[in-house]
Image (cartoon, helix red, strand yellow):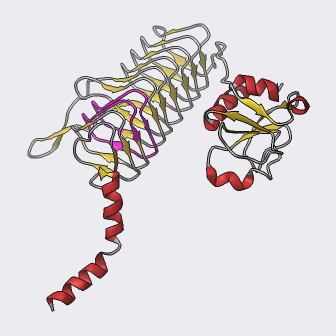
Amino acid sequence: MPKTLSLAEVADLINGQLDGQVEDIKHIQVTGINTLNDSGKNEISFLSNKRYLKDLTSSKAAAILVADNAKVDEHLCVIRVKDPYLSFACLQRFFHPDLTASGKRHASAVIDDSAILADDVDVAAGVIIDAHSRIGKGTRVGAGCVIGENVQIGTDCLLHPKSVIADHCILGNEVILQSGAIIGSDGFGYAWSGTQHLKIPQVGRVILEDDVEIGANTCIDRGAIGDTVIERGVKLDNQIQIAHNVRIGAYSIMAGQVGIAGSTQIGSGCQFGGQAAIAGHINIGAGVKLAAKSGVMSDLEAGGIYAGSPAMPHRLWLKVSALTTKLPEIWKAQRATKN
């Protein structure tokens, strides 16, 4: 049965202030949250981006989440909050809570006798769990997942279908792997013998700390010697490549197709745009923001905003980008001066 809340209960849940003819509207029941354009009379919407202001007055939503200081039509029913997007996220989690593990085990799953699973762990069809692996309570393992030997998985994790955790890797609590994620693939390590590229055994692990989410088809290589470590609260988008012995600091977040070469150290709270590429054996300080398609070839200082390839301070990159479009006429003028 769908969850419902009155507008008054919505406001209480997100610490908001209901603004409008409160006595007339506070008992209206809502069943979910939707966009400004698509919301119905029993749904909440939100405004977190000014580009959607034009849709505000035409929305049919029961109420709209807006910032505390937002100026809106006095006839609109709004709930004023500190951060509309964060409030949207909280409501979305209320209306769409995670499923709870219940100990379902599909008959086609292959679980080694030496593996230890908490009683309520769900194991879907076609799963393989190898020897001496341990899985904590509340964890759900989706169809076709492969869990290698001596793997440790914490509590309340979610492994979407066809994700892979290779031997000896460690997952903390509340870790999410999207479909096709591969944790613990061999690092790309070879030595040239004069006649061939000699493969170097990759004997380290991957460690994912608590509250980490790994996107679909993202690959995280095990360490060559020592571990690849993804610290607490890191969120990685789809199709990201993390090479061996990288360390990503807590609460960093990276968009799709980022690539990080081996042994690079990344501080906490960093934000990387899509397709950013980071060379190996460098250090990126805490809180760095990196624009999409940037190429990082040397260390970056903490707290900076960078863009371009090679990456440079964002303000400098804006000047360089503006100048680039004028290069043909500059070159033409220079040649004319020489002639």
Of all residues, the one furthest to the bottom in this rendering is 339
Quadrant housing the C terminus: bottom left
Q: Nearer the viewer, residue 92 or 228?
A: 92
User: How far from the left and from the top, in percent, is residue 205?
Assistant: 32, 23
Q: Nearer the viewer, residue 161 or 195?
A: 161
Asked whether residue 6 is in view, the answer is no
x 83%, y 43%: residue: 40
x 73%, y 30%: residue: 17
Q: Is residue 84 left or right of residue 179?
A: right
User: How far from the left and from the top, in percent, is residue 215?
Assistant: 49, 37
| Depicted 171 relative to depicted 23: above or below | above
Instruction: Report the magenta stretch's main SS.
Output: loop
Quadrant housing the N terminus: top right
x 24%, y 80%: residue: 331
The range drawn in magenta is 242-271
x 86%, y 41%: residue: 41
Asked whether residue 160 is in view, the answer is yes
- Residue 266 in the magenta stretch? The answer is yes
Q: Nearer the viewer, residue 121 or 252?
A: 252
- Residue 170 in the magenta stretch? The answer is no
Q: Nearer the viewer, residue 316 or 166?
A: 316
User: How far from the left and from the top, in percent, is residue 256?
Assistant: 46, 45
Of all residues, the one furthest to the right in this rendering is 24
Q: Quadrant of residue 262?
A: top left
